[in-house]
Image (cartoon, coloured by chain):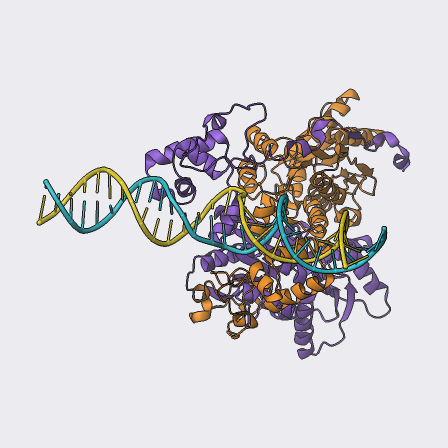
Chain colours: A purple, B orange, C yellow, D cyan
Amino acid sequence: MAFRDRPDLIGMRFVRFHRDAKTTFDHLKGLLVPGSLPPDDPTGSLKQIDPTPGEPHPAPSASGAITLGDVARLAGVSPSTVSRVLNRPELVNAKTTEAVRAAIAETAYVPNLLAGGLASKRSRLVAAIVPTIANSIFTEAVEALTDRLEEAGYHVLLGLTGYPATREAKLVEAILSRRPEGVFLTGVNHAPETYRRLRAAGIPVVETWDITDNPIDVVIGFSHAAVGRAVATYLTDKGYRRLAMVWADDERAKIRRQGFLAALSEKGIGDVRTSMVPAPGNLQRGREGLARLLDEPGPSPQAVFCSSDALAQGVLAEAQARHLTIPGDLAVIGFGDLDLAAYTYPALTTVRIDRHAIGLKAAEAMLARIDGRQEVERTVDIGFRLIERAST
Amino acid sequence: MAFRDRPDLIGMRFVRFHRDAKTTFDHLKGLLVPGSLPPDDPTGSLKQIDPTPGEPHPAPSASGAITLGDVARLAGVSPSTVSRVLNRPELVNAKTTEAVRAAIAETAYVPNLLAGGLASKRSRLVAAIVPTIANSIFTEAVEALTDRLEEAGYHVLLGLTGYPATREAKLVEAILSRRPEGVFLTGVNHAPETYRRLRAAGIPVVETWDITDNPIDVVIGFSHAAVGRAVATYLTDKGYRRLAMVWADDERAKIRRQGFLAALSEKGIGDVRTSMVPAPGNLQRGREGLARLLDEPGPSPQAVFCSSDALAQGVLAEAQARHLTIPGDLAVIGFGDLDLAAYTYPALTTVRIDRHAIGLKAAEAMLARIDGRQEVERTVDIGFRLIERAST
DNA sequence: AGTGGAAATGAAAGCGCTTTCATCGCCCGG
DNA sequence: CCGGGCGATGAAAGCGCTTTCATTTCCACT
């Protein structure tokens, strides 16, 4: 209470300005580029190799950075040999390899993958394009993708499209100029322009988090309509009749909702109220969503289906704030099976998606494609599982 | 109950194999490279420009992809002019620009930034190195960084070091070969090797999530010790005496803990039990942590300080499961002010960090450095705020 | 009409690698 | 003792851009 007025408990902000020479790198231009020797060692061994006229190997790079040519001269071999040591060591004699490695260590050489990628036409880069990573269901897939590709010597370029994916088309265009060797996409609906560019790029494209019979290349996901139907069946089998939804209507949630409503109407349940909230769903919006539902006139629902676990958590919180017992007064079911779902109180019934598998399989599919392997599953349904817990 | 045995509610897995020609890209090698014409248009207008002997501009690229030279020939200008249109349009006559843009559109030209970066020594790449992004406190900073840098024409390379940051050194090494123009790092403690390489790279380096007087370059964060002290003061001022901790002891949490304990012992409170759990903290570990604390013999704590909100959420859940009233039986305070903290039941008292600001300021600092701007704040303490809610 | 200077463009030399192709020893079998 | 073949290495030609520097063009003014 009075605490908010206690400035001593508030972290102090302090900021320092340094205006000395170390503050910018201007004075180091062309000197402290990657791999160069420390400035306090102007007589480093490299400099002592005087590139006399007739010297067979390349002169030191003009820019001052250590290049593969510098390493080659120090090791007394040709640049091609250094390149081989780095990329195809099995082609090089053990003694030579050793000499080259010593030269690399001595010069603190850092290869330039921009140059390497240009020459070899292999960027060893993969783009991951997702709506958001902030407390999102996508992060685990991106993390699995990154980890697996890292092992294989690839790096991941992160592209964030926002929710809804308004920036996707421009992002894909921009990122293709990096010549990625693969693209990880979220969802299966993309701008026509995006399709064109991606097909023209001729690289593996993995669409995820949904399923389609007509993928650009590979799709790894599951049927959102089937999720909706499964939840409908589950809730009606449990005897719930007055149903409602708290829903953040992103593209894929929309399909879950349609599946849910279609299955319900087959069972003669037609009056399902939906409390729509903006995507992405979070705890706050879940609370607000349920509040709106309960404050409206009409019979109160027996069960609420939420488009995400985050929303469901909010629904749980709001229900508790209103002293409703769960599932007695209100049953709640979420979607996603976030880590927390098993540990909310009461534990949350939800739909589990193997998010890690999506990222991992995407990585494997890309690597297989890049290897030119013939048999790649084009449509992978990783399925889902309804996890029953205490909230229903 | 019986539901787990209802296979019809379980998402079916299905997998299809396609073995037709479209399954791999082998047959397209050198054809469908980025920017090439669609294969069903073999008489594309480009092909009709017969590169007769004496043709002043470059012949079509051997690899088949559309290059800047192809665009130049079609537009009837030199490659340098096309390059200018793309990078410094203010230097080019309006009519010429128009002709070049038309040629770019017609050829669906996609610039090659590997080549551009090599020639200009500007990769327009920034590396973001964080322990994890899976439901983590770091994602918002990475997202803000990515968004801001995207605007400026940069892309972000994502590097995941794991928890603890065992892979950081190797990751930094690998990623420097991409010649990033800046590096975003988590924490202020790094391997000596990492320091060396980063300094040698001569690029802006922003360390985050902590503070130090001796940053590699720029540090943007806050004092974890001060957080610990502030929480200690707050809890004791509220009258709590029997205190405990549920703690995931990562590098920075360790410092918060020390600050907390030091401030308490100054107040004569020395017997603070800590329930340690593995990092990263999550809801499950929070529950387990509190359970261990309560099941041990001895007086039960009046208040628990958790190293993260995720953990605090678990503590809340476990307390509820045990029918403890909060804060009457047990007060709970977290750290991080995740979105959900305001909406748990009861709402969680916690410490707010402006995560978004960390990413944004990091981006701004890098861009300022890259621009060669002189005055860059080397040490930025973004502070923190203790947010009092219902759980204490 | 002539001229100076700015604006616009082109020529050419790389950026730092990879990769093909050629060359050079060297060992083994005949 | 000689030729074939293989393992190991080097020479050189790019990869597709950017960026000086030089040249041409175009005006505004005298």
Residue B10 visible, this orientation? yes
Q: Residue at x 52, y 54 (%)?
A: A360
User: Image point 39% across, 41% down: which residue?
Assistant: A81
Q: Is residue A150 above or below residue A268?
A: above
Q: Is residue B267 above or below residue B277?
A: above
Question: x, y percentage for residue A33?
Answer: 59, 35
Q: Residue at x 46, y 57 (%)?
A: A370
- Left/right placement of residue B328 relative to residue B93 reads right
Nearest to the observer: residue B368 or residue A390: B368
Residue displayed at 64% across by 57% down: B81
Image quarter in which the C terminus of chain B is found:
top right
Q: Position of residue A346 (x, y in %)?
A: 70, 53
Quadrant position of residue A92: top left
Q: Nearer the viewer, residue B71 or B332?
A: B71
Q: Look at the image and tell me whether residue B156 can be seen.
A: no
As rendered, which of B212 and A180 lies closer to the eye?
A: A180
Measured as percent of width and height from the top left, residue B41 is found at 53, 74
Name the quadrant of the N terminus of chain B.
bottom right
Callout count: 0
* Residue A362 coordinates in the image, percent (x, y): 53, 58
Q: A298 left or right of B355? A: right
Residue A41 image-quadrant placement: top right
